[in-house]
Amino acid sequence: MKIRPLARGVALTLGAAVVLSGAIVAPAFAEGGQDDEPLGATEATEAEMPTIGGNLGSQRYSALDDIDHRTLDRLAPAWRTHVSEVAPASDDAGQQTAPIVVGGVMYFDTPSGGVIALDGATGEAKWKWENHDIGMSSTRRGVSAGEGRIYTLAGDNHVVALDQDTGEELWSVQPVGDEGEDIGRVAKAATVYSEGTVYVHAADGDRGAVVALDASDGSHLWHFFGSPTRGEVFTNPDGSTFDASETWGPAPAEGEEDCSETGGATSWISGSADPELGLYYATFGNPRSCDSSQDGSGRPGDNLFSSTIVALDVETGEHRWHYQSIHHDVWDMDNVHSPTFADTEIGGEERQVLFYGAKSGHQFVLDRATGEPLRPVEDAPMITDDRQHSSSTQPIPEAQLLPECIAWQKLDPENVPGDPYRGVPNYNGYQPDEDGNLVFNPDSYVAADEEHLTYPAGAGDHREGCLYDPHWDQPILSTTSPNGGADWSAQAFSHRTGLVYFPYGTNPVAHWREARMNGQRAIGQYQTGGILAYDPTDGEVVWRNHLGTDMSHGQGPLVTAGGLLFVGQADGRLLAMDDDSGEVLWEFQTGSSIGSPPVTYTVDGEQYLAVFAAGTTNPYGQSITAGDSMWAFKLDGDFTAESGSQEGPLTAPLQMRRPVQGGGAVDGDDVGNTVLLAREDRTSDTAEAADSVSQTAMQPTHLRVSVGETVTFLNPGTETFPDHPNQREHCATQFFEGEFHAKLAPGESYEHEFTRPGEYFFNDCTDPRPTGKIEVVFDETEHLDGALSFRPGTLAFTGSTFNDVRGSVRAHLELPNGYAYDGGAQLVTPLGLQPIEPADVKANRNRVILTFDKADLDNNVPDGATSLTVEANVATGDGLHRIASSAEVEVKK
């Protein structure tokens, strides 16, 4: 154990003027530095949110109710702080942290991996800490507070304690086991403080662990490994004992890898604590030793404590009980988010309840003291593969929150995007017939597995893409997803409604044993999501709102006694919803992606709501608008952003469909507008290159052509590759519109003319992994001078808050003779990173009248003379074209 008690990091205490959001302000700090313990396991928060879950039971519920249905229209920003601009400044953006609030001061991780303390009433920085001697890390999920200290993580496996009032570094340790053994990497999960102990979770190593440290000096108290030491015996609540290492198969020969001690089972999200019961609850992730996470052939058995929640004695770290949600996980479907507590009635009896689940979309309702299921769970029979040592059963809760099977919908231009859980064609043998219906073909690639599969009664005769369908070398698409369900987004429990609020994402994944750690999200599918509320007393879903963006990666909800649910979105919007119905009542655009849960608190008796708009790239990659802004709101808040509006500008468009792999777009002229099927490159004439099943085996994977051009899809034969042509039939199946489904023998080709702009994904029927995209664009935009005017020509945005902006703006577009409006109208603004869609369009001969909601323009146009541009598609005698026209308006704010 390395303990360094003296501070060596940078902790800038800001007692002089500091630069925030481009203005110099003087500090006037709220009182901080209180030594009170965090709230108990199920006590509602009020003035503070002292843990990232609100209380130790991760309920994310506040008893504050000044902001409610009656006052919501007065909710407006009070301040915004660009965290990275605070000294020591950086240009870093993005972070997954959840803030805490203690004594009127907000503490959270910065985009650069440090910690900052902000005055909750003004947003002014009290201090900011960084220590580049030990290194920083950008992936952080929150800090904890206790005994006048803030506990955080830093680079090179450090846990650090900071003075709560000054940010001074008090101690820094690198946790190891009792005998110096490696416990994994402490880098992601938030620290948790309770009753003199700091709990730290280790991930991304051979073994995951939970480590308990003494809060006073960081010294080691105990640790618990997610995958057991060979021969380690544990005791169940009934007194029976078991050797957990036996669930990883027999002990290996000397010198061989022992899967039980390199099993992964990492604990990469913080846990929850119940001081009254003396228990700390940790969730452990999937196994990933002995070959890969997708290959269970080398680790027969249930593989405890992977995909398991374990209740640990807070004094000793001893196992008190466990509940495994997935036996022998080969899908990376670990349920890891912090368990949520409730003291509520189940089956007519008041119980101490724990809600456990995440990626699978399941919710296990367990007794906190014993781990006993309090709602029915079926040990359901499963399809098995004898090569995988598949578990013959899996625990399935009676209540079904999310669909557990793929929807194989017809390819149809009138049904796009379609069901959120729809399957990409050709996976699992579901191939289009002549009408576009996806029909199972038993002679497709999946036939290779059949001799190894066993189907229980009632399971049908093939894999339909359901949860826990087995796989081997062939890709099998299933739902929910290693990147769906709730993944790491926290859920919430309301004392007011008694409901659990569960955010989710939809992202079906293809599994095969050589796939990357969590399989391959099917290229071209839509990545969406929403939030639902369910009643734990009967397991019924009360409401569901599929909001449209992924909500499984940090977008945890906050519920309040005011009858409201607050939650952020990847597109930068903060939403207020009715907690009884799921209706969206209020929204605010922050200007950058949100991947963190909001918090609420009071300062001097006034309620605030805050959210960190920094963003996380999962699942939308670099299309998200990363940021560094902490926003705080209150009733009648009067903060104004640079645009003169209270909101931030529109964020960049999200890449809603899973992108193709293999590099950027290739211009059609460079490859003769030709795509080679089932080849990873266009020149390699080798046996290994033929009939490739790689996801990049459409060459090029991303082809860009102009509207009206024709593309050739070629299954290359001997004319292309004389020595090693393709030997098998291959397809180009376009989805989801179903524009073409060409089956081609070696040497055959198919031509298709693309008459409209858009993205056209396609894959192969021989093996669905090779996937490409044709991007169809206008080769130029024709500018029409003087064709656009706005009515009124002066745009007045008035009102005390952004909520008061009302009315509409009309754009009149005069088209030349021979031009007919053909959709695609958008308004391009100076500040927004994406165009604005019209609320209404009326086209009459050469005149097009576009109506825009004035509130949509408010945050995307600056004060004063401003040029606005309308773009649209028009049809002429020689095809479809893109036109644009600009006009100047006077903006008054």
Image (cartoon, rainbow, N blue to C red):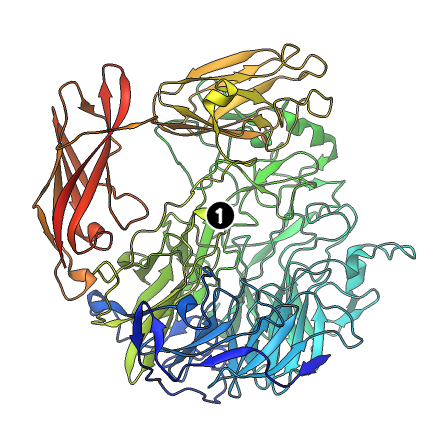
Q: Residue at x 47, y 48 (%)?
A: 622
Q: Position of residue 3 (x, y in %)?
A: 68, 82
Q: Is residue 856 left or right of residue 62?
A: left
Q: Is residue 416 above or below residue 224?
A: above
Q: Position of residue 222 (x, y in %)?
A: 71, 78
Q: Residue at x 51, y 70 (%)?
A: 142
| Residue at disc 1, secondary structure | helix
Q: Nearer the viewer, residue 389 or 810?
A: 810
Q: Position of residue 718 (x, y in %)?
A: 66, 11
- The C terminus appears in which quarter of the rendering? bottom left
Q: Which residue is mark 1?
A: 621
Q: Is residue 746 above or below residue 211?
A: above
Mark 1 is surrounded, within 10 Å at the Cα level, by few (under 14), some (14 to 19) or many (20 or more) other residues, namely: few
Q: Position of residue 785 (x, y in %)?
A: 16, 31
Q: Nearer the viewer, residue 107 or 492?
A: 107
Residue 479 location, quadrant: top right
Examine the rendering and report whether any part of residue 274 can be seen: no
Residue 318 location, quadrant: bottom right
Q: Residue at x 50, y 22 (%)?
A: 670
Count of all numbered marks drawn on residues in the image: 1
Q: Amino acid at mark 1?
A: Gly
- The N terminus appears in which quarter of the rendering? bottom right
Examine the rendering and report whether any part of residue 224 can be seen: yes
Q: Is residue 813 left or right of residue 139?
A: left
Q: Nearer the viewer, residue 286 or 304?
A: 286
Q: Is residue 115 left or right of residue 297?
A: left
